[in-house]
Image (cartoon, grey):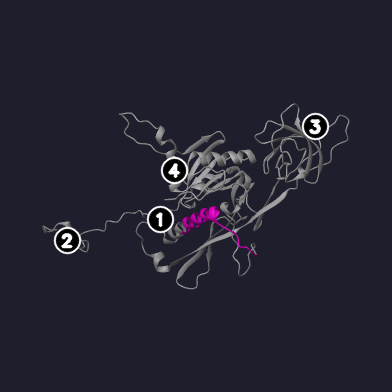
């Protein structure tokens, strides 16, 4: 070949002597990670029906509250009302939260208790409306008949499955032509759509809700699953709530307050703290003031992946799909994302009506969220 003296930057890429220089990799910048689903893992079973149900139960409660603001003498009155008289029996020793006084129940009439104040040599103290009443235990008389049977009723809880689907369609020409960065256009499109569907599944598991009527679905009503946020009611805390640690910034006081409330009111073992990016930076700041670095350190570390408190060891999961103002505290042993039997994500080829190949990626899933009182949610945190 004769010498021309041309340089590549003057020849351009249109001349025949220069080959195309295109990488065989396709870069994807869109976020598609699913950290919460990864942390929960695959369920060990499938849901056998579009309405997946499970049973929940609880022990007889051993606490109540004073419901009386008409005390003649709060320190000596031997009768007062409570919220739920059915929780008490004659012979119960009770104690008001924060008080050293022991009280013995001698009669129960509806929601009115007749009691012995200052029992066992303790000193009677003032009673106030809405004070928590702890039931220590019942003392049965020797030789007495058996006490009346008491029990709780099991509750059936459930959630509906939701169908996730995406179409794939590739022309015959596109399938026959050589492609840059991939070997098969149809397979590539399947991979992209699956990433989108799994991303949407995590988002729905966190934030999804059910229709107010006909949640089972119909020809005009789409069946949707209820997500974690919508399930929670017992341990939902807002920054303006009375008794909740002050301020709208996430701090250790707020995390520990919710962990303690869950620990006191259930046997839940919170092991996941789920946050968005802004709240994750707040958690990282818990230890910023106590970190130290030597002159030889060349790496600055400002990250917490595990938070250990008196109420358990929690892995911190950062997901883009969490509401920016919220923090979830979950017992992962009670949370499962289940496919409907035989309906985990799969590709279903469809008949082609022309010069193209088509199909549908489809999956049907539901959230099994047991014992919502074993989990917690903080809302209304500052998010910017």
> Distance from label 3 to label 2 (Cα)?
100 Å
Looking at the image, is mark 3 or mark 1 nearer the viewer? 3
Q: Earlier in the sequence, mark 3 or mark 1?
A: 1
The residue that label 3 is drawn on is 139
Tell me the residue at 59%/45% (across/down).
Answer: 375
Looking at the image, is mark 4 or mark 3 nearer the viewer? 3
Q: Quadrant of the N terminus?
A: bottom left
Helix, strand or loop at disc 4?
A: helix
Magenta part of the chain: 193-213
Majority SS type along the magenta span: helix
The residue that label 2 is drawn on is 11
The residue that label 4 is drawn on is 282
Queried whether the magenta region covers residue 281, the answer comes back as: no
Task: Kindly indicate whether the residue at mark 2 contacts the one at mark 3 (C-beta within 8 angstroms).
Answer: no
Helix, strand or loop at disc 1?
A: loop
User: Against 5, is 127 above or below?
Assistant: above
Where residue 274 sits: x, y (%)? Answer: 51, 46
Task: Kindly indicate whether the residue at mark 4 contacts the one at mark 2 (C-beta within 8 angstroms).
Answer: no
Q: Earlier in the sequence, mark 3 or mark 2?
A: 2
Q: Earlier in the sequence, mark 1 or mark 2?
A: 2
């Amino acid at each position: 070949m004769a010498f021309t003296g041309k340089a590549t930057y003057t020849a351009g890429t249109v001349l025949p002597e220069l080959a195309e220089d295109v990488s065989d990799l396709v870069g994807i910048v869109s976020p598609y990670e699913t950290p919460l689903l990864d942390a929960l893992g695959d369920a060990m079973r499938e849901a056998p029906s579009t309405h997946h149900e499970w049973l929940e139960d609880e022990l007889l409660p051993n606490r109540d509250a004073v419901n009386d603001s008409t005390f003649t003498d709060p320190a000596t009155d031997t009768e007062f009302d409570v919220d739920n008289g059915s929780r008490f029996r004659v012979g119960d020793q009770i104690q008001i939260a924060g008080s050293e006084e022991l009280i013995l129940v001698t009669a129960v009439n509806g929601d009115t208790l007749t009691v012995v104040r200052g029992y066992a040599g303790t000193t009677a103290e003032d009673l106030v409306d809405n004070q928590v009443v702890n039931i220590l235990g019942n003392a049965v008389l020797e030789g007495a008949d058996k006490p009346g049977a008491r029990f709780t009723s099991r509750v059936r809880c459930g959630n509906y499955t939701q169908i996730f689907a995406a179409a794939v369609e590739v022309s015959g020409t596109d399938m026959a032509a050589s492609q840059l960065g991939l070997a098969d256009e149809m397979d590539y499109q399947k991979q992209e759509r699956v990433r989108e569907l799994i991303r949407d599944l995590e988002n729905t598991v966190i934030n999804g809700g059910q229709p107010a009527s006909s949640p089972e679905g119909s020809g005009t009503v789409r069946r949707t699953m209820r997500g974690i946020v919508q399930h929670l009611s017992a341990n939902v805390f807002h920054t303006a709530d009375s008794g909740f640690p002050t301020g709208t910034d996430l701090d250790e006081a707020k995390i520990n307050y919710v962990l303690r409330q869950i620990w006191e009111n259930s046997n839940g073992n919170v092991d996941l703290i789920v946050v968005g990016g802004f709240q994750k930076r707040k958690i990282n700041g818990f230890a910023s003031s106590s970190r130290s670095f030597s002159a030889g350190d060349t790496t600055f570390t400002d990250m917490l992946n595990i938070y250990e408190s008196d109420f358990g060891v929690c892995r911190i999961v950062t997901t883009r799909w969490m509401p920016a103002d919220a923090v979830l505290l979950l017992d992962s042993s009670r949370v499962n994302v289940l496919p409907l039997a035989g309906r985990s994500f799969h590709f279903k080829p469809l008949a082609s009506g022309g010069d193209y190949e088509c199909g549908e990626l489809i999956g049907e899933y539901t959230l099994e969220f047991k014992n919502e009182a074993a989990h917690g949610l903080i809302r209304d945190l500052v998010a910017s």
